[in-house]
Image (cartoon, grey):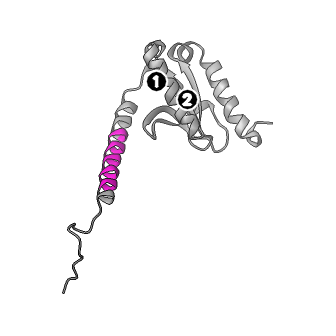
């Protein structure tokens, strides 16, 4: 014998129902973000390809590992070392436009609020000054991992 309550509803509060809808929408967004990141990994820019090659071969601090096109919150970042909480972004020429520059600044602020350090380099810097780019990244990693510096 089923016990029935005295209310008119089906037992699920509107608040709980709304929370479930939000959770489903968030899961759907997260899945879309992962699919987009996967697609972006398959079609890197020339600068991203070059930096990825150097990150995998030249950054050799113990325990550091970079991933590329990583979903973090609402964003996909170009490169990320989760252990060091370091994000590296490679920006094309469109990032100099005011609206995109404002978006990038807000995005950087949000990622920094999550405890990440964000380094930004232009495509030109990566393509023409890769040694300087790698040295900058290495310095940020080494600052967080002093015991891993070569002696």
Tag 1, which secondary structure? Answer: helix
Residue drawn at (50%, 28%), measured in percent from left and top? Answer: 106
Residue drawn at (65%, 19%), measured in percent from left and top? Answer: 132
* 54 in relation to 146, above or below: above
- Say if residue 66 shows up in the picture: no
Mark 1 sits on what residue? Answer: 103
Q: Is residue 33 found inside the magenta-colored segment of the image?
A: yes
* 118 in relation to 145, above or below: above
Crowd tier of the residue under label 1, counting other residues whose Cα lies within 10 Å: few below 14, some 14–19, many 20 or above: few
The one of 15 and 50 positioned closer to us in this rendering = 15
- Say if residue 75 shows up in the picture: yes
Left or right side of 137 for 93: left
Q: Is residue 76 found inside the magenta-colored segment of the image?
A: no
The x and y percentages for residue 59 are 63, 33
The one of 118 and 19 positioned closer to us in this rendering = 19
The one of 17 and 37 positioned closer to us in this rendering = 17
Q: Quadrant of residue 134?
A: top right
The x and y percentages for residue 84 are 63, 40
Q: Earlier in the sequence, mark 2 or mark 1?
A: 2
* 95 in relation to 53, above or below: above
Mark 2 sits on what residue? Answer: 88
Left or right side of 53 for 25: left
The x and y percentages for residue 21 are 29, 52
Residue drawn at (35%, 46%), measured in percent from left and top? Answer: 26
Magenta stretch bounds: 18-34
Q: Which mark is residue 15?
A: none
The x and y percentages for residue 138 are 67, 30
Tag 2, which secondary structure? Answer: strand
Crowd tier of the residue under label 2, counting other residues whose Cα lies within 10 Å: few below 14, some 14–19, many 20 or above: some
* Quadrant placement of the C terminus: top right
| Measured Cα–Cα span from mark 2 to mark 1 | 16 Å
């Amino acid at each position: 014998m089923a016990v029935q309550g005295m209310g008119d509803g089906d037992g699920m509060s509107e608040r709980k129902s709304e929370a479930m809808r939000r959770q489903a929408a968030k899961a759907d967004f997260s899945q879309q973000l992962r699919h987009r990141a996967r697609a972006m990994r398959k079609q890197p820019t020339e600068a991203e390809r070059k930096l990825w090659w150097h990150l995998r071969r030249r950054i050799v601090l113990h325990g550091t590992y970079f991933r590329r096109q990583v979903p973090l919150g609402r964003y996909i970042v170009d490169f990320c070392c989760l252990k060091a909480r370091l994000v590296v972004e490679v920006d094309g020429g469109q990032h100099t436009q005011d609206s995109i520059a404002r978006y990038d600044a807000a995005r950087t602020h949000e990622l920094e609020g999550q405890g990440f350090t964000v380094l930004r380099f232009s495509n030109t810097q990566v393509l023409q000054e890769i040694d300087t780019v790698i040295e900058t990244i290495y310095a940020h990693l080494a600052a967080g991992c002093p015991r891993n510096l070569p002696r």
